[in-house]
Amino acid sequence: MSVDIAPRSAPKLNYAHIRRFLQEELRQREVIIRASGLSAAPNIDPVSWATNQAARRVMDQITAALDRLEAGTYGRCIRCGGAIVAARLDIMPYAENCVDCQRDVDKR
């Protein structure tokens, strides 16, 4: 009995689907920011302000992911250059770091 120990190839990513999903996520964040309007100030409505700031951070991450799609580097860690596992990208399609590098970032 032989055991196949050849490494499995990375799953193919549907870049068109990912692009559409990221663009929709970007639009949703824009709606959140517009809805918070002028009340999104820390001294007027701190919850709205925090929501607005979080939406802006995610928009930056989504925009960077779209840029990586265009550059052909989507799915690669921006720190080490290694592959980001498909399961991580399924959960967070705008992930920019592999799990190991993200742990290092989170420690800081």
Image (cartoon, rainbow, N blue to C red):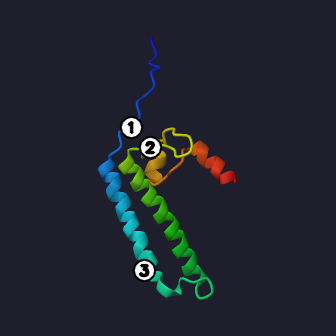
Point out the residue furthest to the top here: 1
The residue at which mark 3 appears reads as 34
Instruction: In the rendered structure, find residue 86 and report the number of the disc placed on it.
Output: 2
80 vs 93, left or right, is right
The residue at which mark 1 appears reads as 11
Q: Residue at x 39, y 64 (%)?
A: 25
For the residues bearing labels 1 and 2, Cβ distance under 8 angstroms: yes
| First of labels 1, 3 by sequence position | 1
For the residues bearing labels 3 and 2, Cβ distance under 8 angstroms: no
At label 3, the amino acid type is Arg
54 vs 108, left or right, is left
Q: Secondary structure at mark 1?
A: loop
Q: Secondary structure at mark 2?
A: helix
| First of labels 3, 2 by sequence position | 3
Point out residue 107 in the picture as x, y percentages from the top left corner: 69, 52
Q: Residue at x 32, y 46 (%)?
A: 14
* Real-space CA distance between mark 1 and mark 3, rounded to the nearest whole angstrom: 37 Å
